[in-house]
Structure formats: C-alpha cells, structure tokens
Amino acid sequence: MERLQKILAQAGIASRRKCEELILSGQVEVNGEPVTTLGVKADPAVDVITVKGRPIKSESKLYLMLNKPKGVITSANDPQGRKIVSDYLPGIKERVYPVGRLDYDTEGLLLLTNDGEFANLLTHPSHHVPKTYWATVKGVPHGSSLEKLQKGVLLEDGITAPAELEYHDVDTAKNQATITITIYEGRNRQVRRMFDAISHPVILLRRIKFGDLTMHGLARGKYRHLTPKEVEQLRASALKTHKIQK
Ligand code: URA
C-alpha cells in the first residue's frame, strides 16, 4: 500500500505536489469512490485508480542509461524523421522518457525512465544534481574566461550557477581545447551557451557523468538497466542537493 499521491506521481501523472492538488480538487477516484483528502493509501496492483475518469497505468518501473550517439533526438517522435532515442532501446516495450534532455548533437549519458516522480526529482530546478560534460571547444580559452564560467556567466535567461572546469588537452595545431565542465543546473543548451558567451563555441559535447553515475565502458548507442543501488544513489543525490543556494 502506498499513499495515493505517490502512486499518481510514480505513474507519471505529475509531481507529487500537483497530484495532491488533483486529489484535493476531487479529480481522483479509487474503486469508483472519490478521494478528496490526503493520506489515503491504495495498492495500484489491486485498486482501480482514476484521474479525471481515466484509469492510471501502473507499470513496473524501468530505469535505463543510454550512451546516446550524436545525431539522435531525445523526443518521443520526430516529424522530420530523424533518429530518436527509442531506436536505441531494442527489447524495451514500455514507454520511457528521457530525464532531462541532450541536444541532437550532444552525445553521452542519457537516463530514461517511466517513473515520472524519479524524473521530476532529478530535473526539478530546485535540485542541483551535478552533470559533467566533456567539451571540445574552438580556440584555447584563457584562465580568465574559464574563471567567468566557474563563477557564473550572464546568459539570456540569467546568470549561471558556479560550475567546475578542468583543462584536459590543448591541440594547438587544430586550435582547440578539451575541457571538462560540471554544472548544477539543466537549462536548455546550457553548456553550449556558456562557451558561446566566452566566444569559444563547442565543437563536440559529451555528457560523461550524471550525479555519481558514469557510463563505465557502455559502448556508443548501447543501453543498460540501472541497478537498484544506482537508482537510490541518484535519488539521494537529488535530495542532498535540494535548494542549495546559488
Ligand atoms: N548543455 C548543452 O549545451 N547541451 C546538452 O545537450 C546538454 C547540456
């Protein structure tokens, strides 16, 4: 037995708070009876739970990690017919959603799940789960430019939170540098925009770490299931970083 709002959130209806609002506004029924108070428990395997008259789907929870190749879109479908992440999930019949996004041209670690609450937890703006990227950029940024990114740089949607940066390689012949950057936010195209802001556009971008999770030799284009321990570690990482002040 679980609390109703938890069951609804896990079924991907909305965040737990929004689900509480749905309950309080009388839009949720259990076995045909409206439930309008919080704290009611149900068993999704036995009880018929409906939201606005529609039964919720409670499937077993899946947590996957994909080493997304470049040139793949993280949406469920693409009107332009480009490759989508589900093309890389043979054998997965359940509908899973990306936890946050990776750009079409970005490769690397992408989490996918059908657990809406888990996805909300990891991507909620008040949580600051670290994400590390391997970025090859045009030119060789000076220390002062990198310092700007470390401290926070002004983008059109506001100043970024402090980030961590480390030089890996400078290729003077190609006039490019490879840098790892760890950010604690998840804004749209954030890493690319941060490097654009210091006039060193990104040539190649690969996410190599999400929380403490790395890809551990998972080949490009391949996926694997997360272990229960990894799922718990990610959850803990999101809760630990809850409401860290910028
Ligand atoms: N930052 C970007 O610019 N792109 C991504 O895909 C992820 C982070």
Image (spheres, rainbow, N blue to C red):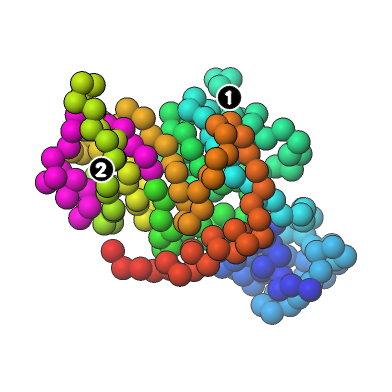
Taking 86 as reference, is 33 left or right? right
- x and y, in percent, of residue 129 in the image: 43, 58
The residue lying toward the viewer, choosing from 118 and 42, is: 118
| Foreground disc of the pair 1, 2 | 2
**Residue assigned mark 2:** 167
Specify the quarter for ligand 1. top left
The residue lying toward the viewer, choosing from 131 and 160, is: 131
- CB-based contact (under 8 Å), mark 1 and mark 2: no
Instruction: Tell me where residue 14 sits by quadrant.
Output: bottom right
Magenta highlight on residue 101? no
Amino acid on which the number 1 mark rests in the picture: Lys
Taking 17 as reference, is 44 left or right? right
Amino acid on which the number 2 mark rests in the picture: Tyr
Check residue 91 in the rendering and tell me which mark sits there, or answer none. Answer: none
Mark found first going from the N terminus, 1 or 2: 1
**Residue assigned mark 1:** 83
- x and y, in percent, of residue 191 in the image: 33, 41
Please tell me which residue is depicted at 51% across the width and 53% down the height of the picture.
213
Task: From this view, report whether residue 38 is shown above or below residue 103.
Answer: below
Quick one: SS at disc 1?
loop
Quick one: SS at disc 2?
strand
What stretch of residues is rendered in magenta? 133-154
Instruction: Tell me where residue 3 sits by quadrant.
Output: bottom right
Q: Residues within 10 Å of mark 1 (few under 14, many from 20)?
A: some
Magenta highlight on residue 141? yes
Residue 18 seen in this snapshot = no
- x and y, in percent, of residue 26 in the image: 69, 68
Please tell me which residue is depicted at 19% across the width and 45% down the height of the picture.
146
